[in-house]
Image: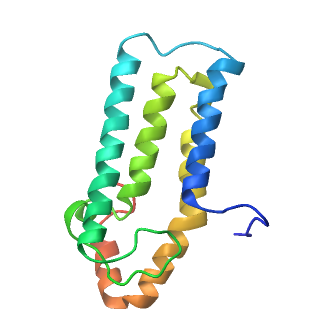
Amino acid sequence: MKQLDGFPDWPQVWFAGALLLAWLQPTLYPVGSFGPVWADLIGGLLVGGGIILAALAIFEMRRHGTTVVPNRQASRLVTSGIFKRSRNPIYLGDVLILTGLILYWDAVLALPLIPIFVWVIETRFILSEERGLRQRFPRDFTRYEKDTRRWI
């Protein structure tokens, strides 16, 4: 995919942009509601789950002494801990947080941001990160991608 000139093309920037759009939507275009109680409860659970998931992944990567920074070469292939369940638990955590905040903010029109964000993260970051891991750890990554799903 083409690089964006002058744009800091990092997953955190895309995540912040999606959150900003979701936050602005009910203010600029207040349309509908998910309901007063259940959306707040489920939204809070999703946000909390996303934070825990990302924290577990960062902890596991630090424990193995490899980088958590996207687009940097990994020194190790981490397949333990939360990485047994998902090859991308930090990105999955981001999706859970985005979904939870959309529910919490009653950002009904922002729901399409969820699949758009997943597509952007997968095409701009995950595929190239996996290519790098496949080149650096060919046998181990081949086995890992057969045993562990990309998202969940």
Q: Is residue 118 above or below residue 5?
A: above
Residue 16, position as x, y percentages in the image = 58, 45
* Total numbered labels: 0
In the image, is 134 to the left or to the right of 118? Answer: left
Residue plotted at (34% across, 45% down): 51
Residue 109 or residue 52, whichever sits in front: 52
In the image, is 149 to the left or to the right of 124? Answer: left
Q: Quadrant of the C terminus?
A: bottom left
In the image, is 9 to the left or to the right of 96? Answer: right
Residue plotted at (44% across, 55% down): 91
Instruction: Give the quarter of the image for residue 111.
Output: top right
Q: Is residue 143 above or below residue 92?
A: below
Residue 64, position as x, y percentages in the image = 25, 76
Instruction: Give the quarter of the image for residue 27.
Output: top right
- Residue projecting furthest to the top: 36
- Residue projecting furthest to the left: 81
Instruction: Give the quarter of the image for residue 36.
Output: top left
Residue 54, position as x, y percentages in the image = 34, 53
Q: Quadrant of the N terminus?
A: bottom right
Q: Is residue 7 above or below residue 64?
A: above
Q: Looking at the image, what colour scheme do you see?
A: rainbow
Residue 84, position as x, y percentages in the image = 23, 65
Residue plotted at (59% across, 29% down): 23
